[in-house]
Amino acid sequence: MRQQHFLMPTLREVPADAETASHRLLLRGGYIRQLAAGVYTYLPLGQRVLRNLERIIREEMDAIGAQELLMPAMQPAPLWEQSGRYAVYGPELIRLEDRHGREFALGPTHEEVVTALIRDEIQSYRKLPLLVYQIQTKFRDERRPRFGLLRGREFLMKDAYSFAADEEQLDAIYASMTQAYNRIFTRCGLRFRAVEADSGSIGGEGGSHEFMAIADIGEDRIVTCTDCGYAANVEQADTGLPQQEKRETPEPAAEKFATPGIHTIAELEQALGVSSKQLLKTLIYEADGRAVAVLVRGDRSVNEIRLQRILHAEQIELADADTVLRLTGCPIGFVGPAGLRMPLLVDREAAAVSSAIAGSGEAGYHLRHVQPGRDFPVEHVYDLRLAAEGDRCPRCEGTLRSSRGIEVGHVFKLGTRYSAKLGASFAGASGEQRPMIMGCYGIGVSRLVSVIAEQRHEETGLLWPMAVAPFQVHVIPVSVQDEEQMLGAEALYRRLRAQGIEALLDDRQERPGMKFKDADLIGAPIRIVFGRKASEGLVEYKERQEANSLEVTVEEAYERIVRLCLN
Amino acid sequence: MRQQHFLMPTLREVPADAETASHRLLLRGGYIRQLAAGVYTYLPLGQRVLRNLERIIREEMDAIGAQELLMPAMQPAPLWEQSGRYAVYGPELIRLEDRHGREFALGPTHEEVVTALIRDEIQSYRKLPLLVYQIQTKFRDERRPRFGLLRGREFLMKDAYSFAADEEQLDAIYASMTQAYNRIFTRCGLRFRAVEADSGSIGGEGGSHEFMAIADIGEDRIVTCTDCGYAANVEQADTGLPQQEKRETPEPAAEKFATPGIHTIAELEQALGVSSKQLLKTLIYEADGRAVAVLVRGDRSVNEIRLQRILHAEQIELADADTVLRLTGCPIGFVGPAGLRMPLLVDREAAAVSSAIAGSGEAGYHLRHVQPGRDFPVEHVYDLRLAAEGDRCPRCEGTLRSSRGIEVGHVFKLGTRYSAKLGASFAGASGEQRPMIMGCYGIGVSRLVSVIAEQRHEETGLLWPMAVAPFQVHVIPVSVQDEEQMLGAEALYRRLRAQGIEALLDDRQERPGMKFKDADLIGAPIRIVFGRKASEGLVEYKERQEANSLEVTVEEAYERIVRLCLN
């Protein structure tokens, strides 16, 4: 491609509303433009990256026998009513009516459509297992679209669905899909981890893994063991069994003391000069409208996903100040585990402390020498806290490290949740009807663009891996008026293209500084500069990730390029 | 691909609601399935055809320097208000509100989005001309979706947009796009004609051509000259200048005669035993609420598109019976050209008759010996009729033939309609601001699947051209239990795939008749059957479009395949 007429509007200024490096650089490099919140146009550079990602994904899907199809975005509401998701999906589901008043959803995912399709087309175990996928535009009306392509309202996904006759078939597909995902993200040049995950609102009975790209801006917290291979979403991680604290002497009776004006754990910690580990937090939740109290140590956070599962609740929410006052007769900050008129769920670790400071249930006072079991009931004990940095690994003697990640892929064992509701059954070998056992497998294709950019950039621009880069080679004559530079650059450009290597020729009449700045922003893996020594047949060869460039002959540059690109 | 686990559900029965051959065969062959009216899932076979079409289109677009980008389906309503289309687009435009109550349209086309994009990114003539395209899903809530993929509500389009600094640049792009379209449709194996077209509601000042695939089920009528290259949409075609009829003797005075119970031209023709060419039809239209009368010969139809243009009307409509009675005091069927209290537009040909029969303006009576100019005013004369089979060509002495066509592509000179409204201007060489001159260029990608199927099929199945076929070769062992047949078929299948030839292996344990019926339906261009003589190294080689098969060695079959496929 020749740059002079290529739509690649780079920006010198840093866009004010772009909070992350990937968002800033994709805007500045002329990869994307926002049309509305969470709705983007992919400019030619961005589209080239997208298409490279699609190619990688297609190759790996085809390699494991997945069949590509294409389902519509417009999905009739009755299908969603059959699965039960139409009522509960909430405002993220974009709904519309056609000219006849029939309701549709714009698909955020395709379980309903694909299950109904396969139900109608496959009747016998002989046609199972079946694995289909599509690369298709999804819609989700996010409450807070952000970070460019990371959380958009219209985005490109690869979603795959498997249909199996038994668990063994499902397990085999799940395993080969997991391997395919490992290959895909490796080819994308990502640092990532597959972690055990909660199966979330999409439901399902079996396993679920998330593929997390490691990044500080990630909204997910994951823990990984330093010793064994254990890795999990923090909400999925079990915490190690705590040791029961022991005391030599019996604990004195609980004692009320004044703590006026103190409302938070941090304030309490500071005022009393104690560690938050000695404090107990009593939190009031509303689970589908029903109040429950949760007790965790002062230094811990509640694992709300797990709490929700324990309570079998559709929705849980921390009660607001007014509700707490109404339910406990006490303002937030002073609520304690004793004397509550609601169930109290106690975290294992909180149950294991021997002496603690806790709310008294009376405004302006706390209690010290509080002992679980003696001073409040310990009837419902669960693993209720979020795993944290430094925890013991639940699988071995190692220690957990905590990091942030961005979900780029997800594999799910759905079981029969959808097939049962939509009637997707098949005849087994002896003729009996059984529901198909499903799995679903997603990759956020447009999100990947941002994630790769987030992991691979420097201040001046992007550092695309070869397989993903919009152009593999950037050929830059310093001065297009210099005939030898221009002829040499043209010749190399044509030669590379003839080899199927994607090259970009900067044929613009711009200052050299501008050309190099743009080249940095775009981030092609190899840059060839035709400068003063072009007349001697010498060019500057630079790999984007190397600090220094080499002065080499055009022929050597060509050979190096071919070696790197044609593998 | 191995057929045993390939999702290719063929149907034995002919689907009841499929009116066209292409629709029936795409359903029966397992190419598509309907999810809702005008909303389809592409099964793996259909998706393969789509992707082949996309590849052809991309190659030809890239060859003329078009740059691929990708714009969103969700388009903010304010953009459409700026162009003035939000109010007038009507119920075909799918509208929705996001969770914050902001209105969006689901793009049926992208003029607004692309014009706003280029407005913001291009400021100078030095960056012009620019040609961008996308292959993207469009939404249009058709009143009557029909014929499978021919008129859908969610469909795949290639839409391209050009931005030029002057007419010369636009003309050059328009010409190269036209050539690219010719190559694309030729590679798709279509019989088609590029015809002059009206620019329709999308607007525009300059030229417009439609690419029409010839098909009896087409909703468009086109006329083509038998002698010169002239071809036009019937609504765009000029009709030849009529010859003024001459009479030797002066015409007798107009004379009223009774025609009780006669309401139509056909009844009149039959009752009086005259040709409809001797009759004059007076039709009452409402143009934006204003009444006008139109006079054409009894054997002609009004070109309503042209009438609308002449009247500069947003909308025109034939008046209903009540309105006609109210406006003329006379029931439909007896309205005549004399004494009307509204403007009368006379078709050139109607003005050229010397003596005619026409309505009298009084129920139950017609007039004979009616002479234009003498018996009614001939002040507003236009070319107002639709061209028809047998007309003289407006360009030469040839004769027009009429046929039906399906629009598969459209090239438009938009001029400054959108750039002026959305403020997409650029600085010319001397710094002056001018609006960009635009063109737009569409191809219905999913529609092409149906059109090719409509032109290329026989009763038993589809006849895909090599470049489009989902599989190029179908390898069929008659009995999978016969080891020599199966081994031979497997070996050929693998050898073809190693060459990059798309082959389908029928490894199903089915009756031979079933296998051959399915193979006919699917329509791969080449079929290789391993039957009884497989043990002697002989196979049946058959090209789908040939009546007979050949008995050849596997080696010869392979060589023939390579010759046909790898070109």
Image: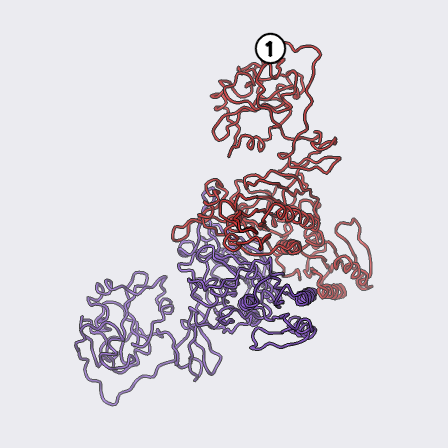
Chain colours: A red, B purple
Direction from residue A127 to residue A288 in the image, left or right: left
Q: Note whether residue B542 is visible.
A: yes
Residue shown at the point (27%, 69%) measured from the top left: B343
Pointer 1 chain? A
Element under label 1? Answer: strand
Q: Residues within 10 Å of mark 1 (few under 14, many from 20)?
A: few
Rendered location of residue B50, percent (x, y):
56, 62
Image quadrant for the C terminus of chain B? bottom right
According to the picture, the residue beneath numbered tag 1 turns out to be A255
Residue shown at the point (45%, 41%) measured from the top left: A87
Q: Note whether residue B442 is visible.
A: no
Rendered location of residue A460, percent (x, y):
70, 47
Rendered location of residue A197, percent (x, y):
62, 39
Rendered location of residue B485, percent (x, y):
66, 67
Direction from residue B36 to residue A245 in the image, left or right: right
Q: Nearer the viewer, residue A432 or A112?
A: A432
Q: Quadrant of residue A382?
A: top right
